[in-house]
Image: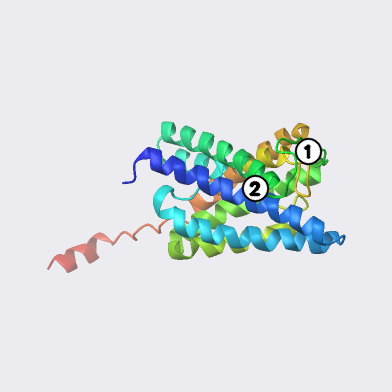
Amino acid sequence: MIDLPRRLAAEALGTAMLVATVVGSGIMADRLTDDVALALLGNTIPTGAILVVLITILGPLSGAHFNPVVTLVFAIGREIDANAALFYVVAQMIGGIAGSFLAHVMFELPIIQISETVRTGSGQWLAEAVAAFGLVFTILAGLRFRPDAIPWLVGLYITAAYWFTASTSFANPAVAIARALSNTFVGIRPVDLPGFIAAEVIGALIAMVLAGWLLAEPKPVAQPARAKLKAAE
């Protein structure tokens, strides 16, 4: 098993690269076009693509959570112990903030920013719950049926969720916090974070409960006593 420091480094690195891609592609898209729909597309494709890459290369090291609600679900399912889960979340948040700062440096913007983009209201919160639900359910179902396909499943799900959710699918508290520190195309006001994070946690927990029932291994059918006796003969 990979030791904890290397797993934490993988989580921090992966989350940093994810956020740098989200923020950086958002800045680039915003600079290249005034068409908001086209800018969103330019933000969507790199995000889905980098998820495929990061999960493929870092998954064998840390499990490639890059997301506190994913870590929470695995901690509840005892796939990761509580202490390691706490360190995972800290590493994800530090990595996410570093990724946001890195994107600013690359585009020669002020490193530390506070977003002024308003993202609040019942529709946005429901969208985040749906986004996190879909992400966690995709991961759990992928682990059950096609673990080798998880990088593509997650990348494609997030690509789709950017467009079918009103919130453009943050689905990740660490990413949301990092985006609050970027007053760019992808930002979110810090005051709007609690609603987003609460919705993400709720959506993830609902997905965990539903997956636990829907994806459960079928129980073996008990044989009648007469059939057992005949088999023994």
The three-letter code of the residue at mark 1 reads Ser
Q: CA distance from mark 2 to mark 1?
A: 18 Å
Q: Which mark is residue 115?
A: 1
Instruction: Please tell me which residue lies in front, 208 or 166.
Output: 166
Residue at the limit of the structure toward the left, as seen here: 233
In this rendering, position of residue 61 left or right of residue 32: left
The three-letter code of the residue at mark 2 reads Ala
In this rendering, position of residue 54 left or right of residue 184: left
Vertical position of residue 138 compared to residue 102: above or below: below
Q: Which mark is residue 171?
A: 2
Vertical position of residue 169 compared to residue 156: above or below: above
Identify the secondary structure beneath mark 2: loop
In this rendering, position of residue 24 left or right of residue 225: right
Q: Percent from the top left, x then y, of residue 224?
A: 28, 61
Identify the secondary structure beneath mark 1: loop
Q: Percent from the top left, x then y, of residue 172?
A: 62, 44
Picture quarter containing residue 162?
A: bottom right
Q: Nearer the viewer, mark 2 or mark 1?
A: 1
Q: Percent from the top left, x then y, of residue 217?
A: 40, 57
Q: Percent from the top left, x then y, of residue 187?
A: 76, 44
* Position of the C terminus by quadrant: bottom left
Instruction: Please tell me which residue lies in front, 112 or 189.
Output: 112
Residue under the image location 44 percent in, 50 percent down: 63
Residue at the limit of the structure toward the front, as seen here: 108
Q: Which numbered disc, 2 or 1, marks the residue that appears first in the sequence?
A: 1
